[in-house]
Amino acid sequence: MKIITVVGARPQFIKAAAVSRVIRKYAVEILVHTGQHYDSNMSEIFFEELDIPKPDYYLGVGSGSHAKQTADMLVKLEEIYLKEKPDFVLVYGDTNSTLSAALAASKILIPVIHVEAGLRSFNRAMPEEQNRILTDHISEYLFCPTPAAVAHLKKENITSNVYCIGDVMCDAVLFYLCKIKDIPEKFFVDRLQFLFQWSGKLENWYMATVHRAENTENELALSEILEAFEKLENPVLFPVHPRIRKFIEWLTDRNQYKNICFVEPLGYLEMLYFTNNATKVVTDSGGLQKEAYIMHKNVVTLRNQTEWVETLEDGHNILCAIDSESILEAVRRTDTEEKFNDLLFGNGDAAEKMCKIMF
């Protein structure tokens, strides 16, 4: 059996690292990288450090409007599908790469496998929400991370070939946390001191990421977020998304932020280590909300909704309005010691379950 897997963005590389390792025991996999994330720190480093197979095709679509990016991918992916004649096309999540890959396959009657199906934020203004809904409705097999995702699909009359297998991102987190144990602690300690330019022992920090358009394309919103970070009681480790690099450089030229450590995007292993050892996480990322929960970290989410509604239970994740006082107040409230549900996203064998169903 031949499967074409399409990836294009950082979270998908991590999921592919977990799934490709298993799927290649059962089938021939052809990996296509659309190039939606093309910055080396957002792409190449993941393939290297996670031992993801080298892509068989690289489309190099780069940035652009949603329409242009999607159109470019549709044309190029169709050409690959017609050449390779796969039995299935496998897609992850909710990016433009996801929708383009699924739509191109569906148009020429190649069945689509959607991993991480059924998520809903119920905000149709989010491009990701549009992508995930459309992909779900044209997929042949839908692999859901949680029972809530299955319930969302049922409400939309999608019930055939729907399976709750757990979350493949959980597979990756658990697998690579074990890998980190093989790396000397001194490597991360030295790296942390280098990033913070800190000579002493740094024990408490917040991990923060900001990348969604509603936050990065609104200078007022971004300024409110940074103002809150500056007022937090612990330093903030803030990997800067390429989308806001120029704005951050302009701000830091004014030398007004002393509590924020602005760094280039981190590799996955570093990101795991620094998140796992952080005091709390502040983010607008759907993936990091989930990873933080798996690592038993409380989260403040810089959005007014989340597709990972399960993480809101017991106060482990708090949704937050984008103003500095609301963010500071939310961070102060995320101190719950309620027990995390270690099986909420599965036990690390989602990829194996999926493959046994498919093959």
Image: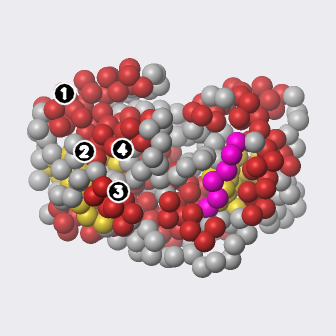
Q: Which numbered disc covers residue 152?
A: 3
Q: Which numbered disc covers residue 157?
A: none
The alpha-carbon separation of the residues under discs 1 and 4 comes to 23 Å
Residue at figure coordinates x 27%, y 69% from the top left: 353
Which of 124 and 62 lies nearest the eye of the viewer? 124
Q: Which residue is mark 1?
A: 79
Q: Secondary structure at mark 2?
A: helix
Q: Which numbered disc covers residue 132?
A: 4
Q: Which numbered disc covers residue 137?
A: 2
Q: Amino acid at mark 3?
A: His
What residue span does the magenta drawing correspond to?
Answer: 317-322
Q: Secondary structure at mark 3?
A: helix
x and y, in percent, of residue 255 in the image: 88, 33
Q: Amino acid at mark 4?
A: Arg
The alpha-carbon separation of the residues under discs 2 and 4 comes to 9 Å
Q: Closer to the camera: disc 1 or disc 4?
A: 4
Q: Closer to the camera: disc 2 or disc 3?
A: 3
Whether 318 is among the magenta residues is yes
User: Which of marks 1 and 2 precedes in the sequence?
Assistant: 1
Q: Amino acid at mark 2?
A: His
x and y, in percent, of residue 254 in the image: 87, 28
Query: How many C-alpha atoms fall within 10 Å of the one at disc 2: few (<14), some, or many (≥20)?
Result: some
Q: Is residue 18 left or right of residue 40?
A: left
Could you tell me if the residues under marks 4 and 3 are in contact, i.e. CB atoms within 8 Å?
A: no
